[in-house]
Image: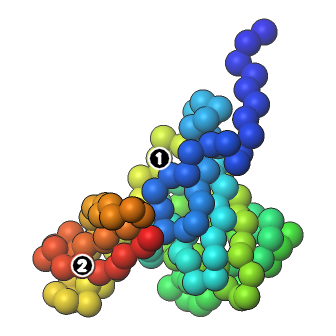
Amino acid sequence: MTGYRKVTVDDLPNTPNPTREKREVDEAVGAAAFGFNVFRADPGERLPWGYHSHPEQEELFYVVAGELAVETPEREYHVEAGEAFFVPPDHPNCARAVGDESIEVIAVGAPKDSDEATIAEECPVCGGVTDRTYETETDGDTTYVLRCARCGAETDRFD
């Protein structure tokens, strides 16, 4: 029988994102039915780029260490180590590390082939509620620069 795979999460490449680390375990093992990512974030860092939703995908965040705050249209939820938070399809949210310590979060999404995200944040320059594009700047370290998809104004940067 073939198809079994084992990986060491810390050996996987760190995927571009605003957290200190994002390891795409699903990609490394070839998982086809669900997404599986391990995030490590310092206080204040967001998972992922911003306020978003997945039109057809369910998400589940499991906090291994630290505390995660998840902003939704109704309220903000605080999820601590040992707790999980479920996000139904097409439900906007933005998660970030809170507290004084770094966090580790496992994020699972299914179905995997429906992981397209819709980011809709108000641009501080033009006021449009739009998606964001990003580009990288490299000067020793890599910086990700987010821009409003409508007017092109810089809206955020992540190192």
> Which element type, helix, strand or loop, lies under badge 2?
strand
Q: How busy is the neighbourhood of tag 1: few (under 14 within 10 Å), some, or many (20 plus)?
A: some
> For the view shown, which residue lies furthest in the front direction?
140
Q: CA distance from mark 1 to mark 2?
A: 28 Å
Q: Residue at x 75, y 22 (%)?
A: 4
The quarter of the picture where residue 129 lies is bottom left
- In the drawing, does residue 17 fall left or right of residue 29? left
The vertical placement of 101 against 142, above or below, is below
According to the image, label 2 marks what residue?
A: 154
Q: Position of residue 153 (x, y in %)?
A: 18, 79
The vertical placement of 55 against 5, above or below, is below
According to the image, label 1 marks what residue?
A: 114
The vertical placement of 138 against 23, above or below, is below
- In the drawing, does residue 107 fall left or right of residue 117? right
Q: Position of residue 27 (x, y in %)?
A: 57, 37
| In the foreground, 148 or 76 | 148
The quarter of the picture where residue 83 lies is bottom right
Q: Position of residue 152 (x, y in %)?
A: 16, 74
Q: Is residue 60 visible?
A: no
Q: Which mark is residue 74?
A: none
**Given contact means CB atoms under 8 Å apart, are the residues at marks 1 and 2 in contact?**
no
Q: Nearer the viewer, mark 1 or mark 2?
A: 2
- In the drawing, does residue 63 fall left or right of residue 128? right
Q: How busy is the neighbourhood of tag 2: few (under 14 within 10 Å), some, or many (20 plus)?
A: some
Identify the amino acid type marked 2. Glu
> Which element type, helix, strand or loop, lies under badge 1?
helix
